[in-house]
Image: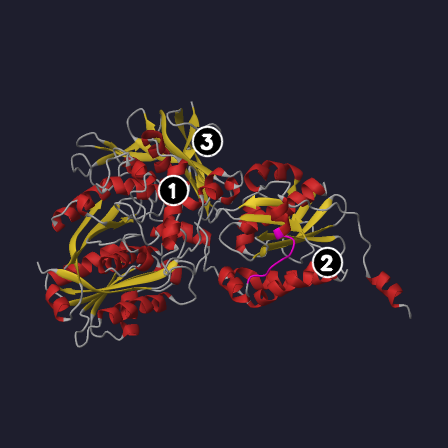
Amino acid sequence: MSNVDELEALLRPPAMEMPPYPPKVITLASGEQMVVRQIDRDEVPTLLKAIAPLIWVERDFYDVVAARLFGELLAYKRYRVRDEYCLVGLIDGVLAGIVNGRAVNGDVGMSYHTITIRRGLRVGSHMFAAKMEYHMEYLNQKEVLIVAESPIGFRRWMIEYPLQKKYEVQHELGGVPSWTLTRDTYFKAKPRLVSGRRPVPPELLERAKTITLPGEETVKAQVLGEKGEGA
Amino acid sequence: MEEKVYGVQCKTCGKETYPAHAVCPNCGGHDFEPLEITGEGKVLTYTDVYALPLDYALRYLRLAIVELDSGLRATGQLVDDDPKIGKRVRTTVGVVRETGGRKIYGLQFVPV
Amino acid sequence: MREVAIIGAGMTKFGRSDLSLIEIMSEAAIRALEDAALGDQKVDSVYVANMGAARLNRQTAIASALVDQLNLFPAMAEAVENGPASGASAFKNGFQAIASGMADVVLVTGGERMREVNNLEATDFVASMSHPQAEYIYGVTLPALAGMFTRLYMDRYGVTAKHLALVAIKNHANALKNPYAHIHQAITIEGILTAPEAVVNNPYIADPLRLYDCCPVSDGAAALVLTTREIAEKLGKPIVKVGGIGQATDTHAVHERPDPTELTAVKIAAQKAFQMAGIGPQDIDVAELHDAFTILEIAESEEAGFFPKGEGHNALEQGVTSLGGKLPINPSGGLKAKGHPVGATGVAQLVELTWQLRGAAGDRQVEGAKNAFACNFGGFGNNVVTTVLMREE
C-alpha cells in the first residue's frame, strides 16, 4: 500500500456522534471555583506534560494510573481509541484533575481513569461525578463499567455510590473486577455526589480556556499528600 | 433465636448495669446475676456513620444510644428509616457484625 | 516536690511520612535535645508516648529502640500507652520523675505512624478503644461517638453546623501559619456549608459531623526536654514552668455517663491542674484543646472553665477564641488541621505552648502569652490529661 492516508484510514477507528459535555463550575471547600470542561485533541500534549512525572510516584497507585492515562490520552490524540473523551478540572486555569473514558456503544460507557493533581479538596470525587454525569445525562447511556485500581478509588466509587458488582463482564482495563453504575444508582446518588452550576459565567470560562500546569514540584508535593485531606 | 444480650444485676444492692463491671459502681459488691437487656425505651441520640471500620461493606450504619424504661442505657444499631431524638423503640437481637465468617449478635432497636 | 521546667521542644512536620516510627521520633527528639543544649548534662530517663506501634507498625518495646537510636544509654526508658492521651500521660510521668528526684533530665517523645496502614485499618485501630462488647461490636467508631455526642449537644445547647464549621475554618486558618501542620488549606463557610456544592465537598462522616469536622489521620512526632528549675537556670534557659497537671477518668461505655453531654473527666482534670498551678481559667492566655472533632473544642472550652456550659459556641462566634481574640484556642491549627498522630498529639500541644510562652510562635504568636493550658483527651473522654504551663520572667 502506497497511500498513507488510506493506511491511516484503516488504522483509525470509526467514530460515533457524541454530544459535547457542557462546562460547569463547582465551588470547592476552599471557596475556589473549579471549571470542569471537555478538552479537544490539541490539548492532550499539555496534559501529558502534567501526567508524565507522576508515572514514577508509587504512592496511592499514581504510577499505574498516570502511565495508563498517558497511554490512553496519547491514543486519543492519535486516533487509536474509539469514542474516547477527556474532561479536566481547572482552578483559575490551573489543572486540578483529569478524568477520561469512552462510549462502548449507545448504551454502555467505559470509565477509564481519574487522576487528582490538586489533593485535599475532593477534586477527584467531583471529577469522577462529572464523568458519570456525562455518561448518564448527556450520552444517555444505560450503564457505565468501572474498576478501581487504588483503595482510594474503591472507597470513592464502589462504596460511596454504591456501585454493583459485574464481574462477569470484562472491563477494558484488564483483569480488575468490573463494577457497574446504573441509571437508578446514578440518580439516587446525584444529590449527594454530583454538583456544579451551568452556564459557567463567561469570565470564568475565559480563564479556563487555556490549561496552565502547576510546576512539577508543586504537583509532586500535592500528590504526595503534603496538603492532606480531612478524616 | 437464642441469642440475647446481658448486663448484670448486683446481688448485694440490686443495681443494674450494662455493660457488666467486675465491681458494682453503686455498692462495691462483686456478686452479680445476669440481666437480660430487653424492653422498650426512647432514643437518646443517634448517628449515621459513613466511615466504617473493617467488617462492614455498607455505605453507612445507623447507631443509637437508647434509654430503656428501666433507666438502663445501651448503645446499638438503630433499624428505623425515620430516626428522631425521643422516639419510642424496643430492643431486638440480630447480627450486628460479621468478622472472619463469625456472626456477632447484638442489640438492634426498632420503632415501637 | 521539685519544680519542673521545659527547656527543649521540637517536632516533625505532621502529615504523611515515609520514615519509620523510630526515625520520626528520633527526628523530633534530636530537635528537642538540640534546643535544650544540655552540654554535659545527661538524659536520665526517657518516656515514649505511642498508641499503635504494635498493631500499625509491628514494633514493640519502642522506648528501648529510641534510646538506641539516640545513643542515650544507660538512660531509663519506657513507653506509655494511654490512647490519644498518651502524649500528656508520658509528659506527666516525666514530670513526676523530676519532681520526685528520681531523674534530673527527662526526654519525652510522642510519635505515631498511622499511615502505614490503610484508612479502614486506621479507623478500626482507633475504634478498638471503645468498649469491646457494648460499643465496638456494633460498628462504633470514635467519629460515631462524637456524632452522637454532637447531635445531643446541638439539641440541648443550640450549637449549629455553622458553629462547627467556624471551628474548622479558624483552625485551618491558624494551621496556615504553622509550618509543622499537616493541612495547609484555607476553607470557607461557602465551600463547606452554604454553597450547593458543600454537600459534596463536605460529606457526612458520622452525622451531624462532616468531613471537615474531623481531624485527619497523620504521621508525626513531638518531643520535650524537662529538667529541674535549678538546672534550667544554670543552662540559662527561658523558664517555661510546669504549673500543674491534672488527670481524670470516666466510664468506658459512653452511654453509662449520667449526662452524656458532660465531659466530666475534662472538668475534673482541668480543676486539678488549675488548683495545682494556683491559677484559674481566667488567667489563661492561650490554650490547645483536643479538637479531634470540632464539637470537642467547644465542649472542652466549657468544661475547662473558660466559658459557661452551653456558651462556648457563642464565644467562638464572637471571635474570642481566634488569634487576636481574648483567649486564642488552637493557634497551632489543633488536631483538626495540624494533624493527629495519636501518640504525638499531647506532646505536640505542649511543644506549641512552649513556643507560645517563649514568644517563638512566629505568625501565630499570641502576644504576651504568660499562662497556657492544654487538654489531651483519651478515648471518648474516658481518660483526660490537662496541663498548665507558665512563663516566668
Tell me: C285 left or right of A2.
left
Q: CA distance from mark 1 to mark 2?
A: 44 Å
Residue labelled with disc 2: A41
Near-viewer residue (A199 or C146): A199
The chain identifier of the residue carrying mark 3 reads: B
- Circle 1: element type: helix
Near-viewer residue (C233 or C276): C233
Residue labelled with disc 1: C166
- Circle 3: element type: loop
Label 3 environment density (alpha carbons within 10 Å; few <14, some 14–19, many ≥20) = some
The chain identifier of the residue carrying mark 2 reads: A
Which image quarter holds the N terminus of chain A?
bottom right
**Residue A123 is covered by the magenta coloring:** no
- Circle 2: element type: helix
The vertical placement of C322 against B46, above or below, is below
Q: Are marks 1 and 2 in contact (CB under 8 Å)?
A: no
To which quarter of the image does residue A160 belong?
top right
Percent x, y for residue C51? Answer: 32, 56
Type of the residue with mark 1: Leu
Type of the residue with mark 2: Arg
The vertical placement of C181 against C166, above or below, is below
The residue shown at (22%, 31%) is B15
Percent x, y for residue C244? Answer: 16, 52
Q: Are marks 3 and 1 in contact (CB under 8 Å)?
A: no
Residue labelled with disc 3: B79
| Magenta-colored span | A207-214
Identify the coloring: secondary structure
Type of the residue with mark 3: Val
Percent x, y for residue C119? Answer: 45, 53
